[in-house]
Image: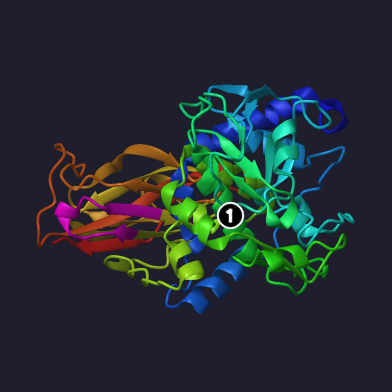
Amino acid sequence: MLGSHMAPIQLQQLVRALTLAFALCGVAVAQGAYYNGVDTSSQAALRASLHALIDDHTRVPYTASSTDTWVVLELAQQDPANAARILDVYRNRSFAKVGGGNPNYEREHVWPKSYGFPDDDGMNMPYTDCHMLWLCDGGYNSARSNLPFGGCTQLCNEYPTDLNNGQGGGAGVFPGQSNWSSGNGSSGTYQVWPGRRGDAARALFYAAVRYEGGTHGVTGVLEPDLELTNNLGLVASSNTGQNETFGYMGRLDVLHAWHVADPPDAFELHRNDIVAAFQGNRNPFIDHPEWVECVFQGTCTPTPPPLGARYCSPAVANSLGLPAEIEARGSAVITDADFRLLGSNMPMNSAGFFLCSRTTGILFQPGGSQGNLCLAGAIGRGVGGQIVNSGFFGSFGVQVQLDALPQPAGPVAALPGETWNFQAWYRDTLGGVATSNFTDGWQVTFR
């Protein structure tokens, strides 16, 4: 029960703090500096660089008297309509949050633990990895058991969903919004309902890249090599009742189709943010679904380089001892309407905004700031139309309307051939004293 993990008041405070932090930082965090070192030049390079990025995460205890997987998952699967409830994964039912040991929902291993890592010895990483764990209606969890994912027919057993969060509901029509299952064990099939099919696929894509064998870089504990396959014989071979060097799950082709048909939604993005806050690693296939084609299908399109050029760099170091950075992504073609600004290397939960000007300059420590202003002339504040927050990862970003760049006399439209300069201002604290700072500058010529 809840009391065995965390006092109700403590949990409520944690819920409020995290909900506020992630509401402020939003999805832009996923597109910040976290992925700067990823190499998209080839299938092998992308897989290796993603593994290096998400490897060696912080282990959340499966069950503990402090923060454990129950706490994380109840935050991650919070019902958008009611913060005191969760939405389970297969039934899409809303349950009141009551913590571990309750009769309503259980922890579902999306990659069944029997396929490679059944023994939680207190150090088993995939067993407690919250990117691979879901809260699930107890009966539906038992029905799924360790069935591989796959396609079903109207002759399969139906497990309907509830209508919640604008999804699910209905029964008696195949496939409808129901889950369907047939068979037993590795030769069976479980077809997830349409609203969570992509979620299931991306959880397994994460597992296959996160776990490549070897040992955990901090604890030295052995980890399995988890691989996705269409060969159900390999899946069966990894069900030995003990932790194995290799674990297999499937069906890869079905998972790829589910990923394409059901792209990430707000619920899945929120879940990724919450789990990352506790484990320190993200599911890259939620943030960058396009990488699935390269890693698992071999169709790789290199990510284009950042737009424009950096100047006024490095910025003055902040309270983290880091110079904050700005860069632009998307397209410099005005009519593409795809221009984004990203700031990174800032303290957690720092409020800030982006600035713009057609003129560069240098003004040291304006208004008592720790940093330097690298713009001059007519300077507009609030590019993207909002104050943003750096959140858990010290990053923020905005989508920019190039037909309404802020200027002191009112918004103006960028024109082809014009060069604009951008910088971000953000709050900071040094030696307990409130201050502010700036990123370096970024210059773009639009087309």
Res 201 visible: yes
Q: Is residue 19 left or right of residue 220?
A: left
Percent across and percent down for residue 322 are 53, 62
> Which residue position holds label 1?
282
Camera-side residue of 162 and 405:
162
Mark 1 Cα within 10 Å, few/some/many (few <14, many 20+)?
many
Range covered by the magenta-colored residues: 328-342
The quarter of the rendered structure image containing the C terminus is bottom left
Inspect the magenta stretch and tell me whether residue 349 lies in it.
Answer: no
Residue that lies at the very extreme toward the left in this rendered image: 416
144 sits left or right of 299 in the view:
right
Q: Residue at x 47, y 74 (%)?
A: 39
Up/down of 259 relative to 141, above or below: below
Residue placed most toward the observer, 252 or 187: 187
- Please give left or right for residue 379 compared with residue 118 in the image: left
Question: In this rendering, would 132 be left or right of 376?
Answer: right
- Residue most extreme to the front: 155
- State the image quarter where residue 237 is shown: bottom right
Residue 429: x %, y % from top left? 56, 45
* Amino acid type at image mark 1: Arg
Q: Quadrant of residue 206?
A: bottom right
**Foreground: 305 or 229?**
229
Give the residue at x 83% y 67%: 221
Quadrant placement of the N terminus: top right
| Numbered disc 1: secondary structure | loop
